[in-house]
Amino acid sequence: MDRTAQLCFSEVRLGLMPDWGGGPYLTKLVGSAIASDLILTARTVNAEEALKIGLVNRVSGKGRSVNEALKLAEQIAQNGPRAVRHALYVIRQSRGLSLEKALELEAETAAELIASGECMHGITAFMEKKKPEFPD
């Protein structure tokens, strides 16, 4: 998020409410107390507060958001593509699960990933002090 950006859930000012998942997603992201505050007051939050409450996870300099997002994407793209997909899958699916079920899902998904053999490219490169080249 650009350091100068501001966010607002202004629907209630118009006699509306967040839809298309805005309320539930915000609640899952920041908790019900903060979601209620933001939605019911329709107040504006700056980048610093958005970072503090967990609404965003990074703040960039003015006009640098796209460049920072591209750097982040490049950093992620250097990792094992299957590992990234599997980890993201577990993160997303775990939101609605008990800890026990989420741990089961993680173990199953990790076993599938290891069976794919992708990790051998990363481990070998690490041992040889080289940059890994992942097939996919």
Image (cartoon, rainbow, N blue to C red):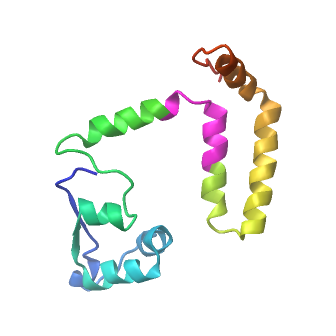
The location of residue 36, given as percent across then percent down, is 38, 83
Compared with 68, 26 (above or below) is below
Quarter of the figure with residue 63 = top left
- Residues shaded magenta: 76-88
Q: Nearer the viewer, residue 130 or 110?
A: 130
Residue at 72% over, 28% down: 119
Q: Residue at x 31, y 78 (%)?
A: 38
Magenta-drawn stretch, dominant element (helix, strand or loop): helix
In the displayed structure image, the side of residue 56 where residue 115 appears, left or right? right
In this rendering, the count of numbered labels is 0
Of residues 67 and 15, the one nearer the viewer is: 67
Q: Residue at x 77, y 65 (%)?
A: 101
**Residue 82 lies in the magenta-colored region:** yes
Q: Is the residue 121 above or below the residue 93 in the image? A: above
Whether 128 is drawn above or below 40: the answer is above
Residue 26: percent from left, percent from top: 43, 70
User: Within the magenta stretch, is there residue 15?
Assistant: no
Q: Is residue 3 left or right of residue 118?
A: left
Residue at x 74%, y 52% (from the top left corner): 106
Percent across and percent down for residue 94 are: 66, 61
Quarter of the view holding residue 125: top right
Q: Quadrant where the C terminus lies?
A: top right
Q: Is residue 122 left or right of residue 26?
A: right
| Position above or below: 103 against 27 | above
